Amino acid sequence: MAVNTMQNAITKICKMTSVIPLIELNNHQIAKPLAQTLLAGGLSTIEVTLRTPAAFKVLNEMAGVAESIGGVGTLIDPEDVQRAANAGAQFAVSPGVTEDLITACEKARLPLLPGASTPTEIMLLLQKGFLIQKYFPAEASGGYSRLQAISQVFPQISFFPTGGITEQNAANYLKLSNTICVGGSWVTPKKLVEAQDWNAIKKLANDAKNLS
């Protein structure tokens, strides 16, 4: 899968929603009802972070939910790329990028959304053809005011900010011309997920869906 093909796929996925929930789940048995709840709340795209031993099982469970689009996040090892694809991941998100990671995603035909936070990193990704990039860590890197300034230098690039994005500041990012969508974990707070409070999570998803 060439970079331009990756970009077309990522563009389509990001334009489906304004908010992509970031999932860190230890119990794969509640992955399917969680995905169904988010879908019922209006959020069809989900990023499962590789921060727990259950992550690949979570991906596999969510892959069984029709109309739900599951991606893998915090992808840093090329060795995990094929595992993610085999588990049903439909896209990949990385905090940064390496040549090996790009090559692995190309071979696995897994669309990659690579991360950057500095002008040099942004330029290197642009040189490789990535016009959609993850902006991470968003708040620690200067927040939406810095991302707004970046738009003046790189107007051709759209960003997916994550890292410190909350229900309170998400709308500010989404108002920026160079933000395609945002990612955050506030939609799936740990306490509500562990309690399997699907009604509360559905409301949070619906509220996130209506952010603009």
Image (cartoon, rainbow, N blue to C red):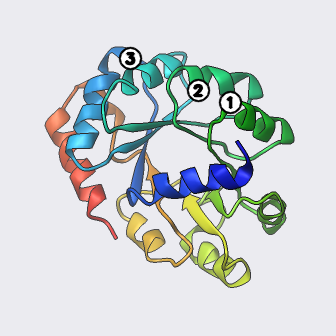
Horizontal relation, residue 153 to residue 9: left or right: right
Residue highlighted by disc 3 = 27
Among numbered discs 2 and 3, the one appearing first in the sequence: 3
Amino acid at circle 1:
Ala
Task: Tell me, for residue 4, which label it has, or none.
Answer: none
Residue name at image x 34 percent, y 71 percent: 212
Residue 117, position as x, y percentages in the image: 71, 60
Residue highlighted by disc 1 = 108
Amino acid at circle 3:
Asn
Q: Nearer the viewer, residue 7 or 113?
A: 7
Q: Secondary structure at mark 1?
A: helix
Residue name at image x 26 percent, y 41 percent: 39
| Structural distance between the alpha carbons of marks 2 and 3 | 20 Å
Mark 2 touches mark 1? (CB < 8 Å): yes
Image position of 21 with respect to 149: above or below: above
Position of the N terminus, as image quadrant, is top right
Q: Nearer the viewer, residue 165 or 178?
A: 178
Q: Quadrant of residue 153?
A: bottom right
| Structural distance between the alpha carbons of marks 2 and 1 | 7 Å
Residue 45, position as x, y percentages in the image: 40, 45
